[in-house]
Amino acid sequence: MGDALSPAYLAAWATQIGALSAFMGGFASTILVMLLTHDSRRRAVQWAAGLSALSAVAFIVAAVATTTLVAGSHADAPASVARQAAQGPARLMAVLFFSLGAYGLIAAIGCAGWVRSKRMGWTTTIVAGLGAVAVTLNFVTF
């Protein structure tokens, strides 16, 4: 993250991450509401709901941070705003909170199967584990 990015590249990157964060935040919020209305006090429901809440909030923070980046990358942005967007905490927050949201949502999906049955729990846990590995490989190789 120490490399200087062009404003156009930063804006394109932030626009994509912001849109994905908004979409996935909505998905995480929907899962949260469904779990909160589930009539069960099982530990799996509590874990899945907590992870969904974590994910939804993380995606909201990432969407706000990327909005700051897009605004700061605009050609007509004042120099101080552009400098803050390129060098300030918004870029780091976008990456960290997007990552937290992605892993939180994957973990919530992994926990969600345990609400139904042990077999479904193992299935969703394995699928979520594979997803977490794939996301990690993508982050590491980017």
Image (cartoon, rainbow, N blue to C red):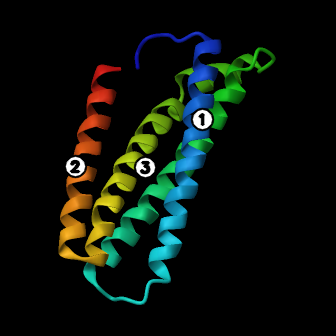
Residue on which the image places disc 3: 101
Amino acid type of disc 3? Gly
Extreme-front residue of the structure: 119
Residue 120 in the figure: left or right of residue 31: left
Q: Nearer the viewer, mark 3 or mark 2?
A: 2
Sequence-first tag of 3 and 2 = 3
- Left or right of residue 45: residue 86: right
- Residue pointed to by mark 2: 129
Give the crowd class for mark 1: few <14, some 14-19, many >=20 residues within 10 Å: many
Image-based side of 94 in relation to 141, left or right: right
Q: Residue at x 25, y 72 (%)?
A: 114
| Residue that badge 1 annotates | 66
Q: Amino acid at mark 1?
A: Thr
Q: Residues under labels 1 and 3: Cα distance?
A: 14 Å
Q: Quadrant of the C terminus?
A: top left
* Front disc: 2 or 1: 2
Residue type (three-letter) at the residue carrying disc 2: Gly
How far apart, in angstroms, are the residues tagged by discs 3 and 2? Answer: 15 Å
Q: Is residue 20 above or below residue 142?
A: below
**Residue at point 31% right, 57% down?**
107
Q: Position of residue 141 (x, y in %)?
A: 29, 20
Label 1 sits on a secondary structure element that is helix
Whole-percent x, y for residue 86 in the image: 57, 21
Instruction: Examine the rendered structure and indicate whether residue 7 appears above or below residue 132.
Output: above
Asked whether 40 or 72 is in front, the reply is 40
Front one among 99 and 33? 33
